[in-house]
Image: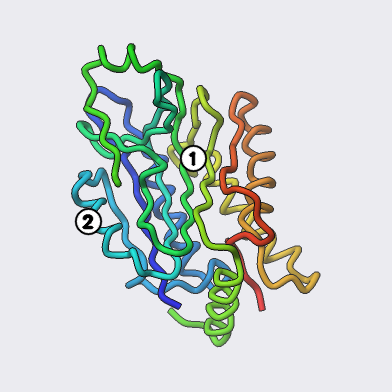
Amino acid sequence: MKRKAFLIESSRLQSHPDLPGARVDVLNWKNFLLSDEGGAWEEKEIVTLSNPTRIMLQGLLALEASTDYVFITFSGHGFHIKGKDLDESMICLNTTENVAVSAVNPGNPRCMLIIDACRQLVQEDVLIEMSAANLILLSAASPNRVAYRNIFDIAVTQAERGVIRLFSCDIDEAANESPHSGGFYTNALVECCRYWHDNIAANKKLYYPAWDAHQSAAIHTTLRNAQQHPQYSGGRRNKYFPLVVKP
């Protein structure tokens, strides 16, 4: 199975506070993906991006239209715009360019997108008056590594096609972070995955579905920050993409 991961952070924007935790998120995700339990990804399958341009991201995603599975994470600034015909969660790629979350989609068979960013509600008429950017819609191997990788691939292909999106907070909420451990939600998600692998996988389940991991991480995130409520968007499914595997 052909797979690709894009780990994106937009921690440094002019007129916005620096988000060192977003940079930590990228490192945490990369280390997790490279681990056996994270799916035994290879370095060449992982691309990290810091404040990419719209054209760069658009071009990279377009190249993956035929890839079997694409995994995308974003950590940084974001907001939700609503008004007239608009109802979109947006992420800030860089100081001058924003993009709709719904448009960060290579159009490949199976894709998962994890967004750790604020979703402050902004009305369209207010946004137009802002001096921000125009809105742009983007149409080390172990003995068991092969087994981990195979289980991950099989779990992905058995899940229904489509896109699963996990948000670190609800609309009109802020996504909090620690400069040392990263975003509250990302940190909770990765830690829940590792905990499942090390302590719970003995029940013979071969993988930890994204929905289960999200539910657990959401509880921990809200316990840590009562005003932050992670959300799932992925439609009705029988099976979810895996986040953790264990032979």
Q: What number of labels is visible?
A: 2
Q: Position of residue 18 (x, y in %)?
A: 32, 31
Contact? badges 2 and 1 (CB < 8 Å): no
Name the residue that disc number 2 marks: 59
Q: Position of residue 22 (x, y in %)?
A: 39, 42
Q: Nearer the viewer, residue 182 or 171?
A: 171
The residue at the point 34 percent across, 45 percent down is 9
In the displayed orientation, state which residue is furthest to the right. 203
| Comes first in the chain, label 2 or label 1 | 2
Residue type highlighted by circle 2: Gly
The residue at the point 56 percent across, 53 percent down is 190
Q: Nearer the viewer, residue 41 or 1?
A: 1
Nearest-to-viewer mark from 2 and 1: 2
Name the side, left or right, on which 132 lies relative to 160.
left
Mark 1: which secondary structure? strand
167 relative to 172, above or below: below
User: Marks 2 and 1, Cα distance to the nearest angstrom?
Assistant: 27 Å
Q: Nearer the viewer, residue 19 or 232?
A: 232
Classify 10 Å Cα crowding around label 1: few (below 14), some (14-19), many (20 and above).
many
Name the residue that disc number 1 marks: 183
Residue type highlighted by circle 1: Gly
Mark 2: which secondary structure? helix
Q: Position of residue 145 (x, y in %)?
A: 53, 81
In the displayed orientation, state which residue is furthest to the bottom. 143
Q: Quadrant of the C terminus?
A: bottom right
Q: Nearer the viewer, residue 109 or 14?
A: 109
